[in-house]
Image (cartoon, rainbow, N blue to C red):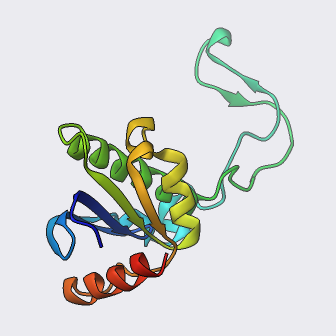
Amino acid sequence: MNTEPQWVLVADASRARLFHGTGDELVLESTLDHPGSRARVRDLMADANGRKPAGPTRGPAHGGNSISEGVGRTGAAPTTDPKEVEAQKFAHELCDLLAERTRDEANASVVLVAPPQFLGLLRQTLDKQVAKRVRHSIDKHLVNLDAKQLIERLRSELTSN
């Protein structure tokens, strides 16, 4: 590991830890939790069946609330997976936090550690300035390791690259 200041984000779609420091001297700065990513899909949906109007509607222009006037499909699958939406929300929250924390450190690098799918989501969501600072990306699920184990794994991962 190097001796320049760095931010290490270790995350999955529902939990994250942000470390700051140099080399082996990383200090836990923040722990974040996103329970929505662990919730069941039916709990995330306002209406479990994704109800939509059954046919054409008569809206406020006809004097009131939208009222269905026809027959049609009364239920529809959601257009996006609610779990994916929650993961995207958490990725945006984490990327905003990284942008805020790295703003004042011109030479600080960033290391991202996350499972492959969430790592890709983080990369897509990163601010351009933060993306330029990413020195390493590790596509492994390490968020459950304690700080000492994590530093050992980071050392072995970063020296093998």
Along the horizontal axis of the image, is 13 left or right of 116?
A: left
- Front residue of 22/26: it is 22
Q: Residue at the location (65% across, 9% down)?
A: 61
Residue 126, position as x, y percentages in the image: 45, 45
User: In this rendering, does residue 32 appear at all?
Assistant: yes
User: In this rendering, does residue 46 appear at all?
Assistant: no
Residue 94, position as x, y percentages in the image: 34, 53
Q: Residue at the location (43% across, 54% down)?
A: 91
Residue 125, position as x, y percentages in the image: 49, 46
- Front residue of 104/93: it is 104
Residue found farthest to the right: 71
Q: How many marks?
A: 0
Q: Is residue 40 above or below residue 34?
A: below
Q: Quadrant of the N terminus?
A: bottom left
Q: Is residue 51 above or below residue 22?
A: above
Q: Residue at the location (58% across, 67% down)?
A: 117
Q: Residue at the location (75% across, 27% down)?
A: 57
- Front residue of 68/76: it is 76
Along the horizontal axis of the image, is 72 left or right of 145?
A: right
Residue 62, position as x, y percentages in the image: 68, 11
Q: Is residue 105 above or below residue 49?
A: above
